[in-house]
Amino acid sequence: MISGQLAEDLVRPVNEGSHPLPELADRYDLRDLVDQYFDKLIQRETLTAKISARVLELALLCNANSSRDLAAAFLATHPTPTLQKDPPGAFFTLTPEAASVVLSRDDLRVSPVARFHEREVLRLVDLWVEKNASQVEKAGLLVKAVRLELFSLSDLTSFQHELGSLQL
């Protein structure tokens, strides 16, 4: 660390349970150290949906904004491995906070087809709640990420009937 560069051996594998170095660096607002850690972490791994989900969770925990954006962009633009229902894609393993980051992205692709309706994002929220029933009380974070201003009037008046898991 004397050189000002983070040693490669201090960066733990992405799937390892804890990453104390960037957490400590974040606590003391050592942004350069946090950024170096995530840069090396991402360089070491080939981005996949599963790895991007883990990087997104860690980046949110450590306030690594550029890495958060990179991981969320990967998840948002790769709908097949991210959003598949069975087996559950990476999106359905995310915490509510991380899932809302993905849902709020302008580059979110719900299907491989280029165009989709925003109400499909609401269906994703419903599926996320189905697969994460123990966190249903946090579903509001995901609903807030849905851009209701992009809904048509008919979608706005009918979407409550489409939501199975969020019904009270």
Image (spheres, grey):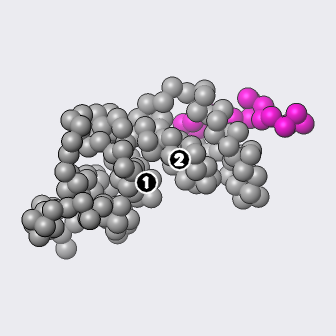
Which secondary structure is most common in the magenta stretch?
loop
The kind of secondary structure element at disc 1 is: helix
Q: Residue furthest bottom?
A: 168
Please give the residue where the numbered disc 1 appears in the rendered image: 101
Quarter of the image with the C terminus in it = bottom left
Residue placed under numbered mark 2 in the picture: 68
Query: Residue 108 or 18: which is nearer the viewer?
Result: 108
| Image location (x, y in percent) of residue 142 | 34, 61
Residue at horizontal 55 percent and vertical 53 percent from the top = 60
Q: Quadrant of the N terminus?
A: top right
Q: Position of residue 2 (x, y in %)?
A: 90, 36
Quarter of image, res 143: bottom left
In the image, residue 25 sits, relative to residue 136, either above or below, namely: above
Residue 151 in view (yes/no): yes
Question: As drawn, is 20 to the left or to the right of 98?
Answer: right
Question: Between residues 15 and 57, which one lies in front from this camera angle?
Answer: 57
Residue 139 can be seen in this image:
no
Image quadrant where residue 8 sits: top right
150 left or right of 62 in image:
left
Q: As displayed, is residue 92 above or below residue 2?
A: below
Magenta residues, start to end: 1-16
Disc 2, disc 1: CB below 8 Å? yes
